[in-house]
C-alpha cells in the first residue's frame, strides 16, 4: 500500500514534468507542421527568451560585457527594475522580432532546400542564439522570478492526506505549469480553428502550393508561426527557468522534447502532449523501480530508448500522419 | 587548360579501375602524400602538430565515417559522439588487458567493436526513417555515455572515473602517453587517415557504395531492383561506425591521452562532426577532409584574432566564436548547400576552361 501510494505520487510528479516537456514539444510541432522545418533551435529559443526576460526585468544593459571590452567602461545595469508583466510583454516583442529576423535572413533563402539542410540551418541558428544570449546577457546562472508560486503545495498535501492517509509532495509551480500549459493549448487550438489567420496556418501546413494559390502569404504565415513558437518558448523558458534557474542546461532539457515528439508524432499537437505525459511518467517510474538496480541517473537516456523501442512498432508515432511512400 | 580529363588514354582494365584514374589527379595526390609524409613531420612545430594537424586528421576520419552513413547511405545519425566513446573505451580496455599486443592492433580491433555496436543501433533504421531515425540515434548517444559513466568496469574502477592512456610503443618509438613527440602523433594519425580514406574511396565507388547510394536515393526503388536493404543499411552503419570508432580510439589514445566520457564525447561532438560533413559536402571524400579542416582551423583562427589580436576576455571571445560559427554554418548552407566539395568541383570546372571561358 505504502509502495503503491509512493508510486502514484511519482506518477503525479511525472505528469507534471511531462507537461513541461510537452510545452517545448509544442513549439516544435507548430513549426514543423507549418513550414516542414525541424526546428532544433526551439530549446535554445526557450533559453534565450528566459535570459532576455531576466535581463529586462533586472534592467541589465544588453551587450554590457562586449561594450566594456570595446570601450573600457564598466556598465552593467541601468539601475531600474521592470515589473514582471511588462518584462514578459517586452520579451514577447523581442521574440517576434527574432522570428522576423529568422524568416528574412535564414528561411527565405532556403526555400525549397532539402529537409536535412533546413535542419542543419536551425542547428546553426541554435549555436548563434546560444552565443548571442551569452554575449547579450552574460553566461552566469540567473534566477528567474515572475511571481509564480513555488514550494510544496499545502492544499494538495492536505487533500491527499485526507483521502489516502498519505500527503503527496507536489510543487505548486508544477500545478501552475499544468494550468498554464492547458490554457496555452486551448488558446492555440481555438486560434487555429476559429480565426482567419489560424485557418490560413492550417492551410499552409496542409499544402504550401495550394495555400499560395488561394492567396495566402507564406511569408506572413511563417513569421506568425515562428512568433507563436517564440511565445511558446517564452512560456517554457519561464517555467523551466523558475524551476531550475536560467542556465545552459535549459537547452539540453529541451532536447528531451525530441523523443516526446517522436512518440507523439511530429505533426500532432495532442500527440506532443500525450507524448510528453508518457515520457514524464515513464522516466520517473523507470528511475524509481529500475534505476537503483543499474546505477541511477537513467533519466538522461530512458526517454530516447523508450521512443526508439516504440517507433520500431509504429514508425509514425502515436498520432502522426501515416507515412505513405511511393516510388 | 590546367585541369583536363581529356587525352588520358588507358590500355588496360587495371589502369582504368585504379583509385585515381586521371593522371593529373594521381600526380596531385602523390605530391600531397609526399609533402604530408616527408616534409611536414620535419618542419612542423609542436603547437601546429598537436593542436591543429592531429585533431584535423582525427576529425577527418570521423567525418569520413559519418559521411559514409549520411552522405552515401542517407541515414542521418546524431550518435557519432557515443560511437567515438565506444572506440576510446574499447582501446582503453584492450590495451590495459593485453599490454603486449601492439597498440595499432588494438586501435583496429576497437574499430571492429564499434562496428558491432553500430550495427546494433543501426537495426531500427530498417523501420524508422528520416528525422525519426536522427532522433532515434540520440538514444545511442545518451545511452552509451551513461553506460560508460555508470559501469565502473569500463574505466577499470579508477577513482576519478577518467580513463588514462598508458605509454605504448610501436617499433621502439613511444606513440601514446604524455612523452610522445608531436611528430609521432601526427604520423600515426596521418597513416590511419590516409589508409582509411583510400578504403572509403574504393568502397564508395564499388558495389557496396553503389548499393548505399541506391538506398539513399530511394530505398523502395532500390529494393525493387534487387538491393537488399537490410544488408545495405547495416553495412553502412558498420563501416561508418568502424571509421568513427577508430577516430574515437585515436582521439583518446593519441590526442587527449586522458578522457572523461561526458566531456570528450558528448552530444556536441556529434553535432561538430555532422557540421563537418555538411560544410564539407555530403557524399564526398574530399569534402570530409575539407569540412574537418575548416571547423578545426576556424576556432583556432578566431581565438587568435579575438583574444590575441583584440585582447578580449576569453569567455567573451568564446561566446562570440559560438555566434560566428553558427552564423557561418547558416551562411554556408545558404550560399553553397553542397559544401566545400562543390566549390572544389566548380574550381576544377573553371580551371578546365581557363583562360578561354567560352
Image: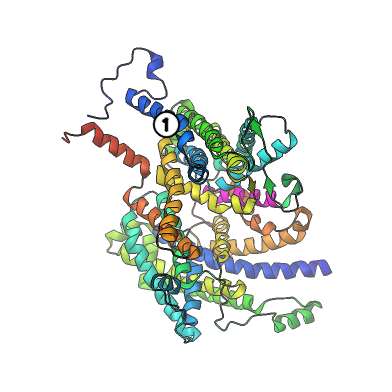
Residue found farthest to the top: B11
B140 within the magenta span: yes
Name the residue carrying label 1.
Answer: B35
Q: Position of residue A183 (x, y in %)?
A: 53, 76
- Left/right placement of residue B182 relative to residue B285 reads right
Snapshot quadrant of residue B244: top right
Q: Chain of mark 1?
A: B
User: Which image quarter holds the C terminus of chain B?
Assistant: top left
Q: Residue at x 72, y 45 (%)?
A: B154
Query: In the image shown, does A207 or A141 lie closer to the viewer?
Result: A141
Q: Position of residue A153 (x, y in %)?
A: 69, 81
- Magenta stretch in the rendered image: B129-149
Principal SS element in the magenta part?
A: helix
Query: In the image shown, does B254 or B307 lie closer to the viewer?
Result: B307
Question: Compared with residue A87, is residue A233 higher up or lower down, i.e. above or below?
Answer: above
Q: Is residue B308 visible?
A: yes
User: Which image quarter holds the N terminus of chain B?
Assistant: top left
How many circles with numbers are drawn on the protein?
1
Query: In the image shown, does B236 or B179 lie closer to the viewer?
Result: B179
Snapshot quadrant of residue A12: bottom right
B142 within the magenta span: yes
Q: Position of residue B44 (x, y in %)?
A: 47, 39
Label 1 CA crowd tier, 10 Å (few <14, some 14–19, many 20+): few
Question: Compared with residue B335, is residue B289 higher up or lower down, i.e. above or below?
Answer: above
Q: Residue at x 46, y 37 (%)?
A: B219
Q: Position of residue A204 (x, y in %)?
A: 36, 61
Q: Is residue A1 visible?
A: no
Q: Secondary structure at mark 1?
A: helix
Question: Compared with residue A95, is residue A122 higher up or lower down, i.e. above or below?
Answer: above
Amino acid at each position: 500500500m505504502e509502495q503503491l501510494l509512493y508510486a502514484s505520487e511519482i506518477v503525479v510528479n511525472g505528469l507534471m514534468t511531462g507537461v513541461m516537456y510537452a510545452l517545448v514539444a509544442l513549439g516544435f510541432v507548430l513549426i514543423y507542421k507549418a513550414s516542414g522545418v525541424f526546428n532544433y533551435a526551439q530549446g535554445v529559443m526557450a533559453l534565450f527568451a528566459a535570459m532576455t526576460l531576466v535581463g529586462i526585468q533586472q534592467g541589465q544593459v544588453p551587450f554590457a560585457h562586449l561594450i566594456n571590452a570595446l570601450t573600457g567602461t564598466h556598465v552593467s545595469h541601468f539601475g531600474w527594475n521592470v515589473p514582471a508583466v511588462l518584462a514578459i510583454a517586452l520579451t514577447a516583442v523581442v521574440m517576434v522580432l527574432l522570428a522576423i529576423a529568422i524568416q528574412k535572413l535564414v528561411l527565405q533563402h532556403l526555400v525549397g532546400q532539402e529537409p536535412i539542410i533546413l535542419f542543419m540551418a536551425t542547428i546553426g541558428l541554435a549555436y548563434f542564439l546560444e552565443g548571442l544570449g551569452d554575449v547579450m546577457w552574460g553566461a552566469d546562472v540567473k534566477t528567474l522570478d515572475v511571481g509564480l508560486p513555488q514550494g510544496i503545495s499545502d492544499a494538495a498535501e492536505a487533500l491527499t492526506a485526507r483521502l489516502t492517509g498519505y500527503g503527496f509532495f507536489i510543487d505548486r509551480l508544477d500545478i501552475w505549469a499544468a494550468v498554464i500549459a492547458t490554457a496555452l493549448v486551448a488558446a492555440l487550438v481555438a486560434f487555429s480553428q476559429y480565426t482567419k489567420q489560424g485557418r490560413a496556418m492550417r492551410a499552409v501546413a496542409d499544402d504550401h502550393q495550394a495555400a499560395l494559390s488561394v492567396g495566402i502569404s507564406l511569408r506572413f504565415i511563417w513569421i506568425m508561426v515562428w512568433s507563436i513558437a517564440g511565445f511558446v518558448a517564452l512560456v517554457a523558458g519561464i517555467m523551466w527557468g523558475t524551476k531550475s534557474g536560467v542556465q545552459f542546461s535549459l537547452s539540453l532539457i529541451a532536447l528531451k522534447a525530441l523523443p516526446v515528439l517522436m512518440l507523439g508524432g511530429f505533426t500532432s499537437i495532442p500527440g506532443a502532449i500525450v507524448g510528453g505525459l508518457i515520457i514524464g511518467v515513464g522516466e520517473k517510474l523507470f528511475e524509481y523501480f529500475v534505476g537503483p538496480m543499474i546505477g541511477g541517473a537513467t533519466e538522461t537516456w530512458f526517454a530516447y530508448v523508450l521512443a526508439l523501442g516504440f517507433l520500431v512498432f509504429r514508425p509514425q508515432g502515436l498520432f502522426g500522419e501515416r507515412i505513405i511512400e511511393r516510388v | 587548360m590546367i585541369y583536363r580529363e581529356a587525352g588520358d588514354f588507358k590500355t588496360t582494365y587495371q589502369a582504368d579501375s585504379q583509385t585515381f584514374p586521371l593522371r593529373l589527379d594521381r600526380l596531385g595526390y602523390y605530391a600531397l602524400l609526399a609533402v604530408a609524409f616527408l616534409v611536414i613531420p620535419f618542419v612542423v612545430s609542436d603547437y601546429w602538430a598537436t593542436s591543429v594537424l592531429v585533431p584535423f586528421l582525427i576529425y577527418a576520419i570521423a567525418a569520413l565515417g559519418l559521411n559514409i552513413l549520411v552522405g552515401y547511405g542517407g541515414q542521418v545519425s546524431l550518435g557519432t559522439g557515443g560511437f567515438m566513446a565506444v572506440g576510446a573505451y574499447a582501446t582503453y580496455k584492450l590495451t590495459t588487458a593485453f599490454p603486449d599486443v601492439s597498440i595499432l592492433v588494438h586501435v583496429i580491433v576497437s574499430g571492429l567493436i564499434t562496428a558491432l555496436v553500430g550495427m546494433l543501433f543501426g537495426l531500427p533504421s530498417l523501420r524508422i526513417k528520416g528525422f525519426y531515425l536522427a532522433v532515434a540515434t540520440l538514444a545511442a548517444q545518451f545511452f552509451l555515455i551513461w553506460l560508460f559513466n555508470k559501469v565502473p568496469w569500463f574505466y577499470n574502477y579508477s577513482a576519478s572515473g577518467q580513463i588514462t592512456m598508458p605509454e605504448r610503443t610501436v617499433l621502439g618509438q613511444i606513440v601514446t602517453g604524455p612523452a610522445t613527440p608531436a611528430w609521432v602523433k601526427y604520423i600515426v594519425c596521418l597513416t590511419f587517415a590516409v589508409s582509411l580514406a583510400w578504403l572509403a574511396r574504393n568502397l564508395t565507388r564499388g558495389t557496396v557504395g553503389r548499393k548505399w547510394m541506391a538506398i539513399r536515393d530511394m530505398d523502395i526503388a532500390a529494393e525493387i531492383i534487387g538491393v537488399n536493404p537490410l544488408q545495405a543499411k547495416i553495412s553502412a552503419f558498420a563501416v561508418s561506425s568502424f571509421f568513427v570508432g577508430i577516430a574515437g580510439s585515436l582521439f583518446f589514445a593519441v590526442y587527449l591521452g586522458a578522457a572523461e566520457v561526458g566531456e570528450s564525447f558528448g552530444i556536441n561532438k556529434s553535432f561538430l562532426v555532422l557540421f563537418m560533413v555538411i560544410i564539407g559536402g555530403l557524399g564526398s571524400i574530399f569534402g570530409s577532409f575539407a569540412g574537418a579542416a575548416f571547423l578545426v582551423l576556424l576556432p583556432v583562427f578566431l581565438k587568435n584574432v579575438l583574444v590575441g589580436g583584440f585582447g578580449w576576455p576569453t569567455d567573451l571571445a568564446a561566446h562570440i566564436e559560438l555566434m560566428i560559427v553558427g552564423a557561418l554554418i547558416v551562411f554556408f548552407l545558404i550560399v553553397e548547400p553542397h559544401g566545400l566539395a562543390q566549390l572544389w568541383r566548380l574550381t576544377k570546372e573553371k580551371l578546365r576552361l581557363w583562360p578561354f571561358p567560352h
